[in-house]
Image (cartoon, rainbow, N blue to C red):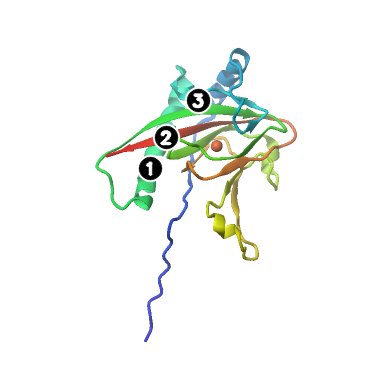
Amino acid sequence: MAMADRLIPVFPTTIFHRRLDGMDQVNAQLIAFLAQLRTTEPSAADGTTTEGGYQTPDDLLNRDHPAIAALRDHIGGAVRDYANHVIRQECTRMPGKVDFVMWGWAVCYKAGDLQGIHVHPNANISGVYYVTAPPATLEKGDAGKISFYDPRPRANMNQLAFQATRHRQAPVPGDMFLFPSWLEHSVSPFQGEGMRICIAFNAKLLME
Ligand SMILES: [Fe+2]
């Protein structure tokens, strides 16, 4: 008698990728705004996993600036769509109401700067939007790329041949990635010219 086989993915980890088209002008405004902030406000990178580089405080999305306002709308829309997916994936039933609070900050990396492996405490959904990417990120290898690590610690204990233990993404201006806040990630340094500018964000879901 033939039995019906079934594959049951339990506890999957899902990253959300959205490419925003037509962001050239917003990105140019963000570059100029962040260049101005670098001269007027000290880096908030101290005590974080940002090594080198310039980091703004995490109130960036509240600043009164047209490019920030445009980006805030895009981030809010992506958080809403991804939250819907995450809730479907993770919860035993849909809540009656879903709202969220959101905050974000920019990180500007030059050659040699990096981000150590970390998670985002006090949030449910985290993400990153890329404003600029240096040429080195187009090469093979880790340069300037974000790595997400397998969150199943026991999966690393006795590995299969060619076991994938991390997922890597190159930054592309206009790209956005959203992921669970508990998912460990890091950013590798790059060499050469250019700057890697990203806007990172957190969302705390409020569900009833
Ligand atoms: Fe992060």
Farthest residue to the left: give it: 96
Looking at the picture, how far across and down is residue 46, in whole percent? 62, 25
Q: Earlier in the sequence, mark 3 or mark 1?
A: 3
- The residue tagged 2 is 203
Looking at the picture, how far across and down is residue 118, in whole percent? 57, 40
| Ligand 1 rendered quadrant | top right
Farthest residue to the right: give it: 192
Label 3, residues with CA under 10 Å away: few <14, some 14-19, many ≥20: some
> Alpha-carbon distance for marks 1 and 2?
9 Å
Instruction: Tell me the element at label 2.
Output: strand
Q: In the rendering, which numbered label is found on residue 83?
A: 1
- The residue tagged 3 is 58
Q: Nearer the viewer, mark 3 or mark 1?
A: 3
Task: State the residue at coordinates (71%, 37%).
Answer: 190
Task: State the residue at coordinates (58%, 21%).
Answer: 34
Q: What's the amino acid at mark 1?
A: Ala
Left or right: 159, with 8 as reference point: right
Residue closest to the eye, 74 or 207: 207
Q: Is mark 3 within 8 Å of ligand 1?
A: no
Looking at the picture, how far across and down is residue 189, in whole percent? 69, 37
Q: Quadrant of residue 56?
A: top right
Label 2, residues with CA under 10 Å away: few <14, some 14-19, many ≥20: many
Using the image, determine if residue 60 lies above or below residue 169: above
Q: Earlier in the sequence, mark 1 or mark 2?
A: 1
Task: State the residue at coordinates (47%, 52%).
Answer: 13
> Alpha-carbon distance for marks 3 and 2?
12 Å
Q: Earlier in the sequence, mark 3 or mark 2?
A: 3
Q: Is mark 2 within 8 Å of ligand 1?
A: no
Residue 114 can be seen in this image:
yes
Looking at the picture, how far across and down is residue 90, in whole percent? 37, 51
Q: Quadrant of the C terminus?
A: top left
